[in-house]
Image (cartoon, rainbow, N blue to C red):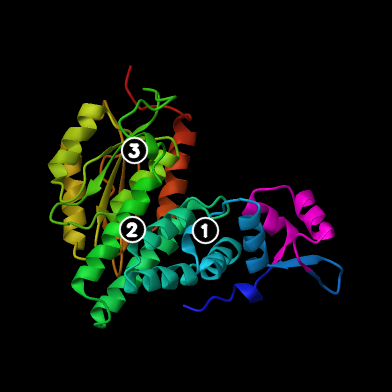
Amino acid sequence: MANPSHRILLATSEVAGLLGIHPSTVKRWTDQGRLRFRKTEGGHRRIHLNEALATAREQGISTFLDPFRPWEANVWLAFAQASREGDFKRVQSLSLSFLSQGETDLMGRFLFEVGRHPHIPLTRFLDQGVRGLMARVGEEWAGGRLQVGEEHMATAVVMEALLRLRPGWERVGMPVEGASEDLPVAVVGVMGGDQHELGAQSVRILLEREGWRVYYLGANVPVEDFAAIQAAQVARLVCISFSPRNTLPDLQRAVRVLGEFYRPRYPYALALGGSLGDLDPGQVEEGPFEALLVSGSVGDLSAWTRSLLQRDGAGSSGRSP
């Protein structure tokens, strides 16, 4: 990978954000000659990325780019494209480059940093970043440019990055401050016969970040188990992930079985999510549920679940009195 850091010009506000200092400090350093800059025709100061990083090291300041040396510029460009344009092509390409070079630790750290970036919506990262990357991985494998082992490594790395995005992941096993029985409850897992977990993990993390208490069932879950856990935990929401190997009859059967186990005393909404392909969501019967969503977008799920809570009152757990 080329390192174009000497060609990337940052505004003083961008340098301040990168270094975690006030913009006035950046301007003072430029006035003092401690940070070299150039001026645009409009008189605005611009600083090369490599100058900003060199100054940070001189001042003993750590930045999120430090672990990626000497590819800081590639990472910066990928972040800029994703945050400013909503385009994740550089994120996907850089992740694949890390993978092909055996830099799986950097790949995981990179995806984690993108996922937690304050100017990149989590739903967009999951829909376009993660899903887009795994589609690229599948294409590379199908084209013979990735081995099966590399495909499995990519899946494992993405899974680890997603798990680190869970709220309080660094305090696993410790009581979570503010935990409450008033949180809305969701059950999330993968359809029976399907081992692909990334979609379900994405939904789990999204819901947890948005204030749900999630019971995560993992891969290859019989439909009856979703019904049993929903009843036991009186969940407001059941989310079932499926992959392209699942057909319309599989989804219809899931809805039918859940409908048979449905208890009106403990109502819940049902979401089926995955790669729709040629599947028409309208072909999936509505069933007795409070609401039904069939979608291939995490963003759609987020908007839908928020509307459910707004309709019934934010913070409602859905438990009957």
> Closest to the observer: 310 or 20?
20
Label 3 vs 1, first from the N-terminus: 1
Query: Residue 167 in the image: x percent, y percent?
Result: 41, 39
Residue shown at 31% from the left, 49% from the top: 201
Label placed on residue 158 = 2
Mark 2 and mark 1: span between their CA atoms?
Answer: 21 Å
Q: Is residue 292 visible?
A: no
Q: Is residue 239 visible?
A: yes
Residue type highlighted by circle 1: Asp
Residue shown at 47% from the left, 41% from the top: 307
Which mark is in front, 2 or 3?
2
Label placed on residue 290 = 3
Residue type highlighted by circle 3: Glu
Q: Is residue 220 left or right of residue 7?
A: left
Residue type highlighted by circle 2: Val
Question: Where, by quadrant of the figure, is residue 40 drawn?
Answer: bottom right
Query: Residue 275 in the image: x percent, y percent?
Result: 30, 63
The kind of secondary structure element at disc 3 is loop
Q: Is residue 98 left or right of residue 138?
A: right
The kind of secondary structure element at disc 1 is helix
Label 2 vs 1, first from the N-terminus: 1
Which mark is in front, 2 or 1?
1
Range shown magenta: 10-37
